[in-house]
Image (cartoon, grey):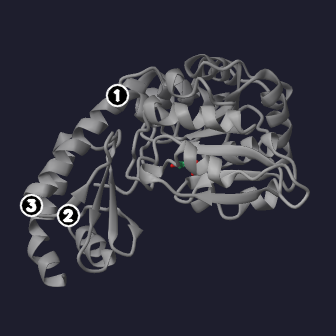
Amino acid sequence: MDLRSDTVTRPSEAMRLAMSQAEVGDDVYGEDPTVNRLEAETARLLGKDAALFVPSGTMANQVAILSHTERGDEMFIHRDSHAYYYEGAAATLWAGAMVTLLDGPEGLFTPETLRGAVRSANIHHPRPRLACLENTHNRAGGAALSPDAVDPVMAEAHTLGLLVHVDGARLFNAAAALDLPAERLVCDADSVSVCLSKGLGAPLGSLLAGSVPFIEKARRYRKWLGGGMRQVGVVAAAGLLALENRHRLAEDHRRAQRLFHGLLDLGYEAWIPSHPTNMVMIETKGPAEQLTGAALERGVAFGMMGPRRIRLVTHLDVDDGGIDQALEVFSQMKGFIQNAG
Ligand SMILES: *Cc1c(COP(=O)(O)O)cnc(C)c1O
């Protein structure tokens, strides 16, 4: 039982079959029909004019930052966001961007916080250029950010003259949780990235979507970073199936709810955000390694989000029986944890 991440899913038989039968061509020449279909379908789902297939979510974010900024420009991002917290110093290394960190509840800063951080046009200041959001927000426990919360931030960013990029690695989880079309969550964004390798079963692949001139620029930066691929329709075929399967994410959310309530009943300090998705967090009394180690011995793997925080993620390869098994292991570890505290 692997609850470490929704990236651990393996392609199904049907997906492998689709991959083996994919029509392919050289995508650097724009001649891979399956990639072209995947890009068109993603653009349609996200309500954008164009999209670009890239190998990873990190590359999607970094290509977006490169395309939106020039060296020395300032980008504003929540302190807990993936594009800052988990991507090394990539925005600084590749784009030469000055990264300004903002705070706010559930992974989102408010319009007021953003306004307070953006300085006037002045030779002493960097040029404020980009605001990056993340939906769902991973370190905030997989929080889906509703349009009520996000729209005013995007509007304020635009008023301040900034562009907006949404890291939507799990945007389809947010759409499922809020029962809204994905495009509704990013209609005011200048760009959005999505991952096909999270909970949807594809072995790899992300897409970046935006306007036609933006995607033209992004295509150039993708090549620059070494992300131009050739007969990659074999992977895009898996991606098309992943997109078709996106409505299944609601099942992962239902199982995460059952896991959450089961953990509370067992006395664990578990929490979920106000719009939960496929994650459950646990605050541990002792070092989190003790709990992860004890669970691994009993056949359940999960990951740490800090010295005393554990993250459990439901996905395609965890069924109802898997949740029962995980709760049984947590029940066995109850005494162990109380002693560890
Ligand atoms: C996983 C993830 C990414 C990209 O990760 P890769 O491993 O590079 O595909 C970006 N943003 C968020 C929020 C993620 O969870």
Residue corresponding to mark 3: 266
Residue corresponding to mark 2: 269
Which residue appears at 70% of the width and 64% of the height? 89
Quick check: 66 above or below 32?
below
Q: Position of residue 320 (x, y in %)?
A: 18, 40
Of the residues shown, which amino acid type is indicated by label 3?
Leu
Considering the image in quadrants, where does the C terminus appear?
bottom left
Q: Nearer the viewer, residue 86 or 241?
A: 86
Element assignment for label 2: strand
Quick check: 141 above or below 198?
below
Of the residues shown, which amino acid type is indicated by label 1?
Arg
Q: Residues within 10 Å of mark 1 (few under 14, many from 20)?
A: some
Q: CA distance from mark 2 to mark 1?
A: 28 Å
Q: CA distance from mark 3 to mark 2?
A: 9 Å
Which residue appears at 52% of the width and 45% of the height? 110
Q: State the mark number for residue 248.
A: 1
Quick check: 24 above or below 280?
above
Query: What is the tally of numbered marks visible in this picture?
Result: 3
